[in-house]
Amino acid sequence: QVQLVESGGGLVQAGGSLRLSCAASGSIVGISDMGWYRQAPGKQRELVALITRDGWTNYADSVKGRFTISRENAKNTIHLQMNSLKPEDTAVYYCNARKRMDYWGQGTQVTVSS
């Protein structure tokens, strides 16, 4: 089993920044991709950013140029630096890790006020 614990969510004004972190623990050997997903009320969960163990990244078009995902393999941690936040970024953000199956964190709320 893999446990994921997110931190760093909160309330911010439009144009502001937040940094999310996700720490993996438990059976972490063999984790490949890690990433961030988000789910807004009434919408499906969507990919925000993905990073492989080798550091290759992929972003949703809506966050390109504003969000940066990074990974510290030695600490089994990923981060999501979110800049120039918009009200439409408001959602619950979930950390994801892949190891033969998907593991999810409990989610952290990000609210961007206009």
Image (cartoon, rainbow, N blue to C red):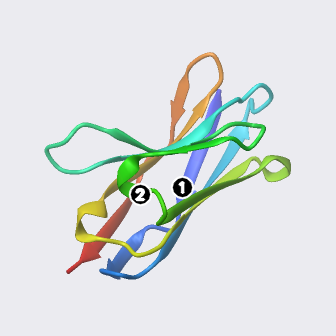
Disc 1 element: strand
Give the quadrant of residue 54.
top right
- Disc 1 to disc 2, how far (Cα)? 19 Å
Percent coordinates x, y for residue 79 in the rendering = 62, 59
Residue at 73% x, 44% y: name it.
55
| Contact, mark 1 vs mark 2 (Cβ under 8 Å) | no
Q: Nearer the viewer, residue 99 or 61?
A: 61
Percent coordinates x, y for residue 103 in the rendering = 54, 31
Percent coordinates x, y for residue 20 in the rendering = 54, 63
Residue at 48% x, 73% y: name it.
18
Question: Which numbered dot is residue 6?
Answer: 1
On the question of residue 47 being in view, the answer is yes
Residue at 54% x, 55% y: name it.
6
Compared with residue 42, is residue 92 higher up or lower down, i.e. above or below?
Answer: below
Q: Nearer the viewer, residue 106 or 94?
A: 94
Percent coordinates x, y for residue 76 in the rendering = 75, 47
Compared with residue 66, is residue 5 higher up or lower down, i.e. above or below?
Answer: above
| Neighbour tally class for label 1: few under 14, some 14-19, many 20 plus, Cα within 10 Å | many
Give the quadrant of residue 31.
top right
Earlier residue among tags 1 and 2: 1
Q: Residue reaching furthest left? A: 42
Q: Residue reaching furthest top? A: 100
Q: Residue reaching furthest right? A: 74
